[in-house]
Amino acid sequence: MAYLLNKDSNECCFLYAHHSFGRFQYSVDTLVNDLSVSKIHTIIEWLNGKWYIRDLSLNGTWLNHKRLQKDSAEELHIGDKVYFAGNSQVTYVVKDLSAPVDQLVKLDAQQNKTTETIVLNNYHLLPAEQPEWAIIYQPNSGQWYLESLHDDEFNTREMLQDNSVISFANEQWVFISSHLELDTQVSSVPQLYIHELDFIFNLSLDEETSELKIHHHNKDVDLHVRCHHYLTLNLARYRAADAKKGVLPANQGWVNTEQLVKDLGVDMRYLNIQIHRARKQFSEVLTNVHDAENIIERQLRKVRFAGASFMIYKGCELESTSDVARTRKNSITI
């Protein structure tokens, strides 16, 4: 993500896709506390893959000692120097011109932004090795949410705002969104729903190795062998058991997380990590599936597998299959 360096304070100024500088605290992204600076003085914005600067002021904006023509866009380059109203004592130096991204920026001991950043995917676990937090993007609302992996009730979800601080691994990071509004595009990829997917689980006889493949519209998606597939498989088992009892499909498979911990022989933190890792993989791999992370669906202290069509193989033997899978079996690739 692009940033400027304030030579006076040595602070990094990370740029939003449309970033304003000025004296009016509540209307600009970066405050310039100088009476010669207009309320909204200068705009830097991302257009057609490049960064441009525009002067909107009465007293002027300078780029490399040259006053900009008012309201005329000028392309920025690395090393450019920017200052306002002829006051070169507060100078911003262009240090990075990469595209806008949603990211975390590391804070130093004095709570200043550093140049160490983490670019966020739509479903991010932090830290990666021993996750403490899940940061999740909801495309429908355009909002980012923060969830603690220590929470077994799934009800502590915080909406992230710009400059929200997150602490993990004895470090502090600040959330900065790109404010980038993408143009609406007509997707050439058909949008699917979870009930259209067929899930094929392959489990070793000793139940040490779990593999998952997903079939849809004569295509197979191989999710390979992962530890978290064992969780998803067992949630499918709960659903199959409820189906045998005659439970309606809309209510099948819900299991209390405390019961799941006992049945799997794990602790609650490990269970939460596996739930989020499974949801993360579904979200990243099944990009053309609506709400793919909700293949593992959650309620207060409850969780379930939301797939309607599934087959579970243990060794080479079919252990169980859903009614929906039976009706589709001619089209499912094993």
Image (spheres, grey):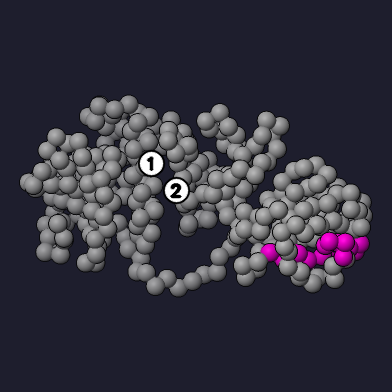
Q: Quadrant of residue 309?
A: bottom left
What's the residue at 16%, 60% (across, down)? Answer: 333
Label 1: element kind? helix
Question: On the rendered structure, is 292 left or right of 312?
Answer: right
Q: Position of residue 189 (x, y in %)?
A: 37, 69
* Residue projecting furthest to the front: 79
Label 2 sits on residue: 123
- The reply to whether discs 1 and 2 touch (Cβ–Cβ < 8 Å) is yes
Q: Residues in magenta? A: 51-66
Which mark identifies residue 276? 1
The answer to which quarter of the image holds residue 81 is bottom right
Q: Amino acid at mark 1?
A: His
Residue 5's spot in the image, x, y percent? Answer: 75, 49
Q: Per the image, is 56 magenta?
A: yes
Q: Earlier in the sequence, mark 1 or mark 2?
A: 2
Mark 1 residue crowding within 10 angstroms, few (<14) / some (14–19) / many (20+): many
Task: Please state, as top left, top right, bottom left or bottom right, where the N terminus lies in the image.
Answer: bottom right
Observer-nearest residue: 51 or 294?
51
Front residue of 299 and 102:
102
Give the CA distance from mark 1 to mark 2.
9 Å
Front-most of residues 106 and 329 = 106
Is 296 displayed left or right of 323 in the figure? right
Q: Is residue 263 left or right of residue 125?
A: left
Taking the magenta stretch, the answer to whether it contains residue 123 is: no
- Residue 283 visible in the displayed image: yes
